[in-house]
Amino acid sequence: MDAYQREKEANYHALQQMIGTLPEQSDFNKELMRVAGAQIPVTKDLEYNKKEIFKALDWAKENEVDHILTPEGALSGYCNQWYSKLEQVESLLKEIEEHQKKCGVALNLGTCFQEPEGFGKINRNQIRHYTKSGILSAVTNKTHVLQSEDCIGRDNDKHGLAGVPLTEEVGGPTAIGMLCNDMWGWNEDPHTIRKDGEMKKYPIDLIMHATNGRNFLEDDPQYLPFNNWADGFLRMTAYKTLIPILTVDSPVQWDWDMNEETVDYYPTSSESGLLDFTGWQTSVPRRGRQYFYHDLDVGSTTPFKFARYLKDTDKPFNLMVTDKDGKRLFAEGVNI
């Protein structure tokens, strides 16, 4: 048996086992969770950033959102020597925490922060995950940091992933966070969630990806390769892990001057929205300040959703389940 046939046979046995023991959709109760993103400007002015986060929280409350995600560096700004404003970062963070608690919306806040850890205070680029009641339930530290961020990255080998509880119930649905280059990287070792041998260890219902990439106009020769690079990594990560991705970018350049007339001048470096293994589930404009949400079913596991899709859809994936002669490898009665 050659390698081609072995791969076909392996796929056959895996899918037959998956679909042959598949419970009916009716055996699970739908559990819809409204997850949202705030495609908001991120500037060097921290007070301005705070007001943007307040507005996003107010919108989320009005729209009955469960979780909202901001871009990377939404409070601290990005690549702007934020560490020279540590006291202001800490002070404004307290104001945001108070407002978030009043709104009753779970906030996943991208910011640089000096985090107290076992070896002292360490500069981190992170997502701070707050429950609806205002509890800091988890912190995601960026792995692949840039030198200009003035932060230390998470150790991709020694440090596990921080599970983010999506509810305050024990054993409920769980997310993990990623920041910018953790998704697409640049010649680095792949992030833990993108390693085939590692990702299956984590029962995850959602990936929250906060980013703040470089903006290019569409006629800039750099736009197309960077845009396709980001879109391809988002799509392939959602496909390979089977985990939905909530991703949010900022619509302005890192040194934007807060002129509202130019807030929609550049497209985001990557698309904001929610996608799963079938593709984008939202259609968020690439320019300007945008708020969006998606009602995500977390009542069943992501592998179950994929198996149900294979069994029920009229447009199944081509998963190499025929041999070289086109002979069907599925047993009689198994229909995808």
Image (cartoon, rainbow, N blue to C red):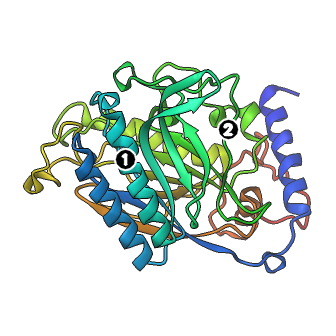
- Amino acid at pointer 1: Ser
Disc assigned to residue 187: none
Label 1 crowding class (10 Å Cα cut-off): few <14, some 14-19, many 20+?
few
Q: Is 248 placed above or below 316 here? A: above
The answer to whether residue 289 is left or right of residue 278 is left
Q: Secondary structure at mark 2?
A: loop
Residue 171 screen position, x and y as percent: 80, 60
Residue 327 screen position, x and y as percent: 81, 50
Residue tagged by mark 1? Answer: 91
- Amino acid at pointer 2: Leu
Q: Tell me which residue sits at (66%, 42%) in the image.
A: 162
Q: Secondary structure at mark 1?
A: helix
Q: Tell me which residue sits at (39%, 23%) in the image.
A: 150
Q: Tell me which residue sits at (80%, 80%) in the image.
A: 26
The answer to whether residue 233 is left or right of residue 78 is right
Closer mark to the observer between disc 1 and disc 2: 1
Q: Tell me which residue sits at (69%, 64%) in the image.
A: 168
Q: Report the label total.
A: 2
Q: Is 217 placed above or below 313 here? A: above
Label 2 crowding class (10 Å Cα cut-off): few <14, some 14-19, many 20+?
some
Given residues 200 and 82, the one toward you in this image is 82
Residue 249 screen position, x and y as percent: 36, 48
Disc assigned to residue 161: 2
